[in-house]
Image (spheres, helix red, strand yellow):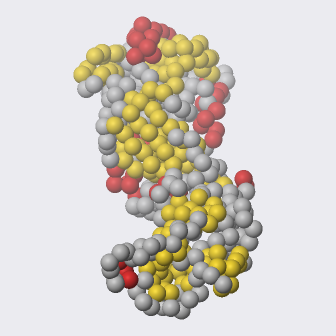
Amino acid sequence: MSHHLRHQTRGRTVVGCALLAVALGAGATACGSDDPSSAAPYDASDHISFNGPVEAGQKADPDEPLEILSEDADGRITDVTAVDAAGRRVAGELSADGLRWHSTAPLAAGARYTIRVSTENGDGERGRKVLAFETGEPDEQKRLKVTFGPGAGTYGVGQPLTAELSRPIEDPAQRRVVERSLKVESTPAVEGAWYWVDDEKLHYRPKEYWPAQATIRATSALHGIKIGDRLWGARVKPLEIRTGERVIAVTDAASHTMTVYRNDEAVREIPVTAGKPGFETRNGVKVVLGKESFVRMRSSTVGIAEGSSESYDLPVHFATRVTWSGEYVHAAPWSAGSHGYANVSHGCVGMSTANAKWFFDTVREGDLVEVVNSDGDSMEPFGNGFGDWNVDWGEWRSGSALTGTLPNLVASGESARLRPGSA
């Protein structure tokens, strides 16, 4: 964008907008006034130029800065505004002599801009020029794509939002650009924040659980924004989800009971069995990941050798998954004598078939299952389901590129995702 399209105006050689330039018509002098500043602005096209493609219809390179020049030493630039169709302004700087304005922030790609230039000559007469142009789109390989999750639908109040990036973003400044463009709004409104799980994934959750019956919408203003060297934001499909009732199931591994709360009211107390010594159920808050009416659980998938005293191969009904590594809440009729009395499972929370069916029919994806008083490890924050609620709010905010620098807390490997279940 270094060439200028020149044309003749008022018998002089001048530089005009080489894109879709629209100049305001010359204004008439106000009647009955000798004050030049009270007159309508005159057409400043004959001495204002800006850098752009030399052929009409071409689009500007968003990697090049925008520059506005006054070619008349007696006609100073007093103000420049550059705004795209989305209302985003381009920051710029005007020289002390008023002869040059240049952008100090990158233009957006794939955007249409309107430039308004105000001038003033030595006699105090005001001039104006309006220009319009478009910037080109970056190549596909130069675009950062974002996919919001989960899918549209109704979830429990513990469901975090996710943002998957099409390529890793490691630079802190680039992370700030990305995160600043990802917006989450809820009705009712609540305080929340993004957390960088790793270079390609962010999670969003509020300070407390989502309100019941809330509407949550995630959007992106990343399209056309320059993130880094030759990397631009792509269009992002928005996401809208709703929450249902507030359902929280609390398993006390010491008393061998699960209490299910709906909207903070206890609606059912269920005798259960949790993980026995050596296979203790994880403590902490977990989020329901899905429900399977039938799962075949094999001990070999969780590292127990076939033929050992701990091996099993069981048909399991009404299985509600809470970790990728194989923790479920499910029917366990084979251990009925231990329900409410002892922990004998390999990590899952077992109960009668009737209670398991009721639980299966009651909860939905995103509902909360909390385990207390187990001798097991704490639920991993990330990598084995949604352990987001086990990170306190101060640490969570430190995981935002805008408010902190907390190291990533990714836990567990991909192998955890391959395990069908532990009975």
Residue 36: x and y in percent read 38, 83
Quadrant housing residue 204: top left
Give left or right: position of 382 versus 7: left
Please name the residue shown 47% across and 57% down the image. 87
- Is 353 or 175 nearer to us in this picture? 175
Which residue is depicted at the point 45% across and 73% down? 28
On the question of residue 390 being in view, the answer is: no
- Measured along the vertical axis of the image, is residue 309 above or below residue 125? above
Give 364 or 64, whichever is nearer the viewer.
Answer: 64
- Asked whether residue 23 appears in the rendered view, the answer is yes
Tell me what residue is drawn at x 52 percent, y 25 percent: 290
Identify the residue at horizontal 50%, vertical 87% (top origin).
75
Residue at the limit of the structure toward the top, as seen here: 354
Q: Is residue 400 above or below residue 294?
A: below
Most extreme residue toward the left is 265
209 displayed left or right of 319: left
Q: Position of residue 286 (x, y in %)?
A: 43, 34
Q: How many marks?
A: 0
Work out which residue is located at the far right of the displayed protein and give it. 55
Residue 347 position within the rendered picture, expressed as x and y whole percent measured from the top left: 48, 28
Up-down relation of residue 33 to residue 243 (above or below): below
Camera-side residue: 248 or 164? 164
Report whether 18 appears left or right of 274: right
When asked about the image quadrant of residue 313, the answer is: top right
Q: Quadrant of the N terminus?
A: bottom right
* Closer to us: 117 or 191: 117
